[in-house]
Image (tube, helix red, strand yellow):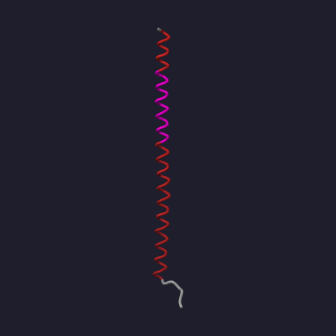
Amino acid sequence: MDDRLSKSEIGKDAVQEIVAAGASAVGEVTTIITTAVKDVANAIGGFATDVFEIRDGARRATQEFHEDDA
């Protein structure tokens, strides 16, 4: 019995491994990009929250200043 692989079987196996490796790489890159987009969105959201809090604090301080003048 001959257990050697034919050229076409070797070629098929090589193509199968290439496709699997490519799919894995695409999956990894997609995960990296998805995580980066999520992190950027969270950073921008946190910054916006800080801006609102600073603005409200400045508004309250201005009101208190004018109330003390009156």
The structure residue drawn at horizontal position 49% and vertical position 74%, both measured from the top left corner, is: 14
Q: Magenta part mainly helix, strand or loop?
A: helix
Residue 50 at x, y percent in the picture:
50, 32
Residue 61 at x, y percent in the picture:
50, 19
The structure residue drawn at horizontal position 46% and vertical position 8%, both measured from the top left corner, is: 70
From what the image shows, is residue 16 above or below residue 54? below
User: In the orientation shown, which residue stands out farthest toward the top?
Assistant: 70
The structure residue drawn at horizontal position 46% and vertical position 68%, both measured from the top left corner, is: 19
Q: Which residues are magenta?
A: 42-59
From what the image shows, is residue 32 above or below residue 4? above
Residue 68 at x, y percent in the picture:
50, 11
Instruction: Judge whether residue 20 is colored magenta.
Output: no
The structure residue drawn at horizontal position 48% and vertical position 22%, both measured from the top left corner, is: 58
Q: How many marks?
A: 0
From what the image shows, is residue 57 above or below residue 21? above
Q: Quadrant of the N terminus?
A: bottom right
Residue 15 at x, y percent in the picture:
46, 73
Instruction: Judge whether residue 44 is colored magenta.
Output: yes
From what the image shows, is residue 7 above or below residue 62? below
